[in-house]
Amino acid sequence: MSYEEKKVINIGVVSELTGLSVRQIRHYEKRDLIFPERSQGGTRKYSFEDVERLVELSNQVDDVKKGQVHTAFYHANYKTNANI
């Protein structure tokens, strides 16, 4: 097993590395998009691969949000210009 696959990073460090809140990270877990392991004490442990996956997911969400904003802006301008 490579170091990238080992589940050794706690959720606080993952949050710092990704810029996501702990709540967002837990949301992705709840949606079965990432799969942390649990320590004997119940602490979530993530791998570097999980961190990369979270960054990819976050970027995809940002792209969708930008697309929606762009689309809404386009339609608002189209309606305004069509009425001229």
Image (spheres, rainbow, N blue to C red):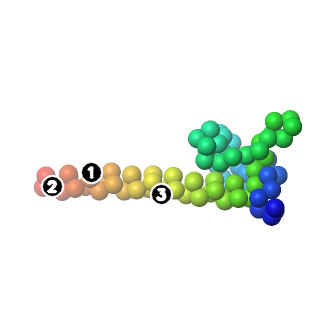
Q: Identify the residue under disc 3.
A: 63
Q: Are marks 3 and 2 in contact (CB under 8 Å)?
A: no
Q: Between disc 3 and disc 2, whose residue precedes?
A: 3
Residue 8: % across, % down: 82, 52
Residue at 26 percent of width and 53 percent of height: 75
User: From mark 1 to mark 2, how far is it between C-alphas?
Assistant: 10 Å
Q: Secondary structure at mark 1?
A: helix
Q: Is residue 51 visible?
A: yes
Q: Amino acid at mark 2?
A: Ala
**Category of crowding for the residue at label 3, using alpha-carbon neighbours closer than 10 angstroms: few (below 14), some (14–19), many (at least 20):** few
Eye-nearest disc, 3 or 2: 3
Q: Amino acid at mark 1?
A: Ala
Q: Identify the residue under disc 1.
A: 76
Q: Is residue 24 visible?
A: no
In which quadrant of the rendered image does the N terminus lie?
bottom right
Residue at 65 percent of width and 48 percent of height: 34
User: From mark 3 to mark 2, how far is it between C-alphas?
Assistant: 28 Å
Left or right, 2 with respect to 71, comes to right
Q: Residue furthest bottom?
A: 2
Q: Amino acid at mark 3?
A: Asp
Q: Secondary structure at mark 2?
A: helix
Q: Secondary structure at mark 3?
A: helix
Q: Identify the residue under disc 2.
A: 82
